Image (cartoon, rainbow, N blue to C red):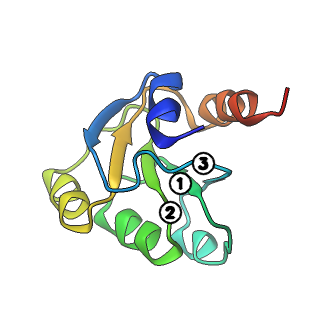
Amino acid sequence: MTMTEMIDFLKAELLVKGECIHRPIRHVVASDLMSDVLLVDEDDMLLLTSLASDQVLRTAQIVGAAGVIVVNGKPLPSSMVNVANDLRMTLATCRLSKYDACVAVHAALKPA
């Protein structure tokens, strides 16, 4: 499943179309603690978080994430959209809670 398909599946609103939007997603990290995210060593990763901060995008770039989806329908600061554009990082927002988003993502990625 690609970032585009994941955004559609979660009924998320795409805010920034990054350069990895068509990259397949094989791993998902759901965390608000960016120090925990920095410990993840997986390729083709999506970051789900309820933290609406520029630091989320910088952390996602460091770990090589394909994109970030901010859950809980949180309003994002305009600076976050600007940083996503600068980093060419896919950024979306979703109304689902982090738990519900994780359950949906698990169902979407679960092998048939």
Disc 2 residue type? Ala
Q: What x and y, as percent, mark residue 24?
A: 57, 48
Left or right relative to 30: residue 56 = left
In the displayed structure, would residue 61 be above or below residue 66? below
Quarter of the image for residue 94 reads top left
Label ID, residue 47:
1
- Graded by Cα atoms within 10 Å as few (under 14), some (14 to 19) or many (20 or more), the crowding at tag 2 reads many
In the displayed structure, would residue 29 be above or below residue 15? below
Label ID, residue 25:
3
Labels 2 and 1: the sequence-earlier one: 1
Spatial CA distance of label 2 from label 1 is: 7 Å
Left or right relative to 70: residue 16 = left
Residue drawn at (45%, 66%), measured in percent from left and top? Answer: 60
Q: What x and y, as percent, mark residue 110?
A: 80, 33
Direction right: furthest residue: 112
Q: What x and y, as percent, mark residue 93?
A: 37, 37
Write down the residue under mark 2.
65
